[in-house]
Image (spheres, rainbow, N blue to C red):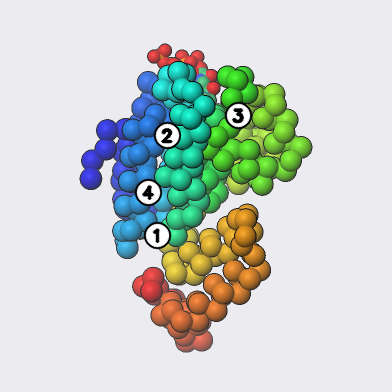
């Protein structure tokens, strides 16, 4: 499938999705959000894809936010729909994918850009990256899950300060906050993400999707994380991957997981 605002490339079990609107610093307009939904869905449904990397094109920005030009005239109803629809088709959708998603933050990750990175399962940043939720400087608040996910990732006090000041933090501060897992020079960013993704592709994809569900359950209203873990743990015993993984260990050979 071809996209107007995305580049999608798959190799060795890894699909890399690049948001490609560099002149607008990869700002998320509605078309791009829709295309991202389709690209993530296609990658998740592709049995050959074991990990997904999302990044931005150019050297300056991952994503500089939601496209401000699209919502400047919105009223209350349209604003509510914008947040609800975006959360549903992209941000919650990505968080709940069964395929692991790594955000490769190659520059500015602001507003909806940081929200997208935070919806991914974890984040790696280049040393020039700058992150923030500047929405209150526009008279609005983060609407794509940012108030919740930033609080989960960095704690309430740091999240409150970042949101209230609308300021940006640099990559090393984000590393100290636990917002990103690694910081590397920009020209090493995709290589490091590929290396991490390759390690993931060697493991059981059925077990990894069970782990995603169990970890996410801790943050979902009405779901008990420990209970979800018990159920997902038990379900693993019914998979061929479990039989293969345990047999391979006992037979002192490398497991060959088929993801079922
Ligand atoms: N929405 C729409 N367009 C955006 C955008 C956004 N969130 N962020 C950047 N752009 C556009 C600019 O309007 C500009 O377009 P133009 O060349 O047609 O005028 C282009 O991208 C380049 O941005 P510019 O502001 O000239 O780059 P800069 O290097 O001077 O500044 C930023 C970079 C990221 C600091 C600045 O673009 C910015 O503050 N963007 C908005 C960030 C934001 O508030 N995001 C949250 C939205 S809810």
Picture coordinates of residue 80 (x, y %)? 51, 33
Residue that label 1 marks: 50
The nearer-to-camera label among 3 and 4 is 3
Cα distance between the residues tagged 4 and 2: 15 Å
Q: Which one is earlier in the sequence, the residue at label 3 or at label 4?
A: 4
147, 106: nearer the viewer: 147
Residue that label 2 marks: 56
Total marks in image: 4
117, 181: nearer the viewer: 117
SS under mark 4: helix
| Label 1 neighbour load within 10 Å: few <14, some 14-19, many 20+ | many
**Quarter of the rendering containing residue 32:** top left
The nearer-to-camera label among 1 and 3 is 3
Residue that label 3 marks: 141
Residue that label 4 marks: 40
Q: Can residue 192 be seen in this snapshot?
A: no
Screen quadrant of the N terminus: top left
Screen quadrant of the C terminus: bottom left
| Label 2 neighbour load within 10 Å: few <14, some 14-19, many 20+ | many
Cα distance between the residues tagged 2 and 1: 20 Å
């Amino acid at each position: 499938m071809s996209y107007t605002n995305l580049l999608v490339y798959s190799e060795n079990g890894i699909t890399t999705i690049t948001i490609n609107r560099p002149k607008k610093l990869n700002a998320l307009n509605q078309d791009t959000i829709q295309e991202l939904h389709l690209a993530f869905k296609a990658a998740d449904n592709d049995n050959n894809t074991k990990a997904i990397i999302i990044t931005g094109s150019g050297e300056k920005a991952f994503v500089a936010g939601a496209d401000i030009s699209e919502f400047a005239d919105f009223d209350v109803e349209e604003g509510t729909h914008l947040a609800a629809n975006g959360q549903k088709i992209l941000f919650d959708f990505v968080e709940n994918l069964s395929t692991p998603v790594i955000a490769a933050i190659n520059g500015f990750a602001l507003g909806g850009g940081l929200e997208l990175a935070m919806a991914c399962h974890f984040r790696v940043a280049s040393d020039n990256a700058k992150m923030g939720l500047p929405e209150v400087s526009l008279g609005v608040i983060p609407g794509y899950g940012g108030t919740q996910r930033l609080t989960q990732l960095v704690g309430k006090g740091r999240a409150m300060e970042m949101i209230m000041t609308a300021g940006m933090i640099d990559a090393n501060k984000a590393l100290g906050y636990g917002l990103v897992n690694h910081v590397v020079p920009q020209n090493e960013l995709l290589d490091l993400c590929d290396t991490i993704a390759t390690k993931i592709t060697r493991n059981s994809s059925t077990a990894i999707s069970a782990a995603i569900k169990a970890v996410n359950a801790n943050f979902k209203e009405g779901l008990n994380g420990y209970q979800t873990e018990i159920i997902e743990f038990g379900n693993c015993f019914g998979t061929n991957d479990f039989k293969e993984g345990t047999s391979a260990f006992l037979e002192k050979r490398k497991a060959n997981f088929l993801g079922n």
